[in-house]
Amino acid sequence: MRRLSSLYFCQKVRVSKLPVLYQNNPQFRAVYQSVRANTSVTTTGLIGSKHSFLVKSLFEQHNETTLWILNNKEEAAYFLNDLEVLLPNLPLFFPSSYRRPYNIEETDNANVLLRAETLQKLKELPKQLVVTYPEALFEQVLTPKELQRKTLNISKGDELSIDFVNETLFEFGFSRVDFVAEPGEFAVRGGILDVYSFSHDEPFRIEFFGDEIDTIRTFDVTSQRSIALLEEIKVLANIEQKEEKEVRQPLLSFVSENTLICTQNESIITAELDALFDFANKAFENLSGEIKRLPPKELFIDGKQFAKELKV
C-alpha cells in the first residue's frame, strides 16, 4: 500500500477559478513518480488550495483508489469542497457514524448512508477518491464478505416474492411503516414495496407482477413522484448496527492494496485515534444492562494499528 505523507499547516483559500497552471504541473507529476518508486513521500511548502490540486493530480495519475485523510472533520469538509469543484461528482466523503462510542441514540443516519455508499463503491469500482478524517477511520467497517451478506440484490424480471423481500428487510433491521421517510424503513401496499436503503440517496419503489419484479424506480419522499427507472438495485442494511456476529476490519484493510493514501499529518491523526480509543474503553467499562456489546478492539482502531496499516 503506497502512502503519501503530507506535513503542512495552512489557512484554507477558496477556489474561485481553476488555475490551468496546476492542471499539468510537472512538480505534481514528479511527486507521483516518487510515490511510485518509494513507500513514503513527504511534501512541504504547499499553501491554500494547492493541497487539493496536488491530490487531484495524484488521483488522475493513479489507476486505483486515492484516500485522503485530513486532520479533522472541518479540514476534511473544506478540502472536499475544493475537490468537488475540481472533480465534480467524483469525491466520496467517508464520515463517522456517531458522536460517541456505544451511544446508539446519537447515530447519524445521513452519515451511515454516506459510509455505506462509499463502501459499496469501493467494493464495486477500482478507482475512487475518498476524503475522510480520524473519527471516521476510528470505526472499523464490515469485511467485503459481511457487506455482501447484508446486501439484497434485486433486478427487473427477477422471480422474487414480496413476502421474501419483506422477511429479508426485517432481518436487515428495517422498520415497516406506512410511508418511508428515512433510511432503514420500508412500506408495502398491495403489489408495491417502497424501501429506503442505507446506500442510496433516494428510496426505491419496486412493483411486483405476481412473484416477478415488474419495475424498479427511485422516487421523491415528499412529492412521491418518480425520479428514474432502474434495471437493478442493491438494498443495504444498516452496516453500523455492530452486531456481535459481525466481522469487521479497518478501512485501510478494506481498500485495495494499491490504494494511494495521503495523510495531512500522520502524528496528529495517530494521537487523535489513541484519544478516541481511550474514550471508547472507558465507555465500554461503564456499560450496563443485558445487551451485550463488542469490545473496543473489535469495533475501533487506535493510533498503533493505524500506523501499522499504513506500512502494510
Image: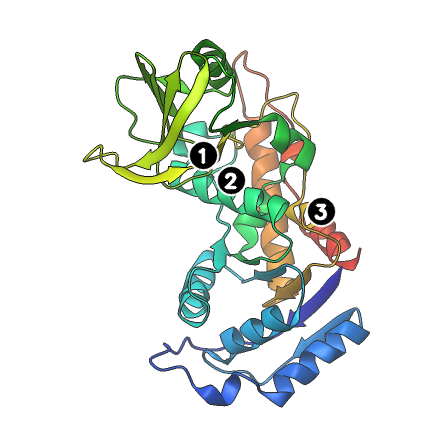
Query: Residue 116's mark?
Result: 2
The image quadrant that residue 215 belongs to is: top left
Residues at discs 1 and 3 in contact (Cβ within 8 Å): no
Q: Residue furthest left?
A: 223
In the rendered image, residue 230, in percent from the top left (x then y), is placed at 41, 37
Earlier-in-chain disc, 1 versus 3: 1
In the depicted view, which residue is nearer to us: 204 or 232? 232
Real-space Cα distance between discs 2 and 1?
Answer: 6 Å
Which quadrant, please, contains the N terminus? bottom right
Q: Amino acid at mark 3?
A: Ser
Left or right of 148: which side holds 53?
Answer: left
Residue under numbered circle 1: 198
The local crowd at label 3, few if under 14, some if 14 to 19, many if 20 or more residues have their Cα within 10 Å, is: some
Q: Secondary structure at mark 1?
A: loop
Q: Secondary structure at mark 2?
A: helix
Q: Residue at x 35, y 82 (%)?
A: 17
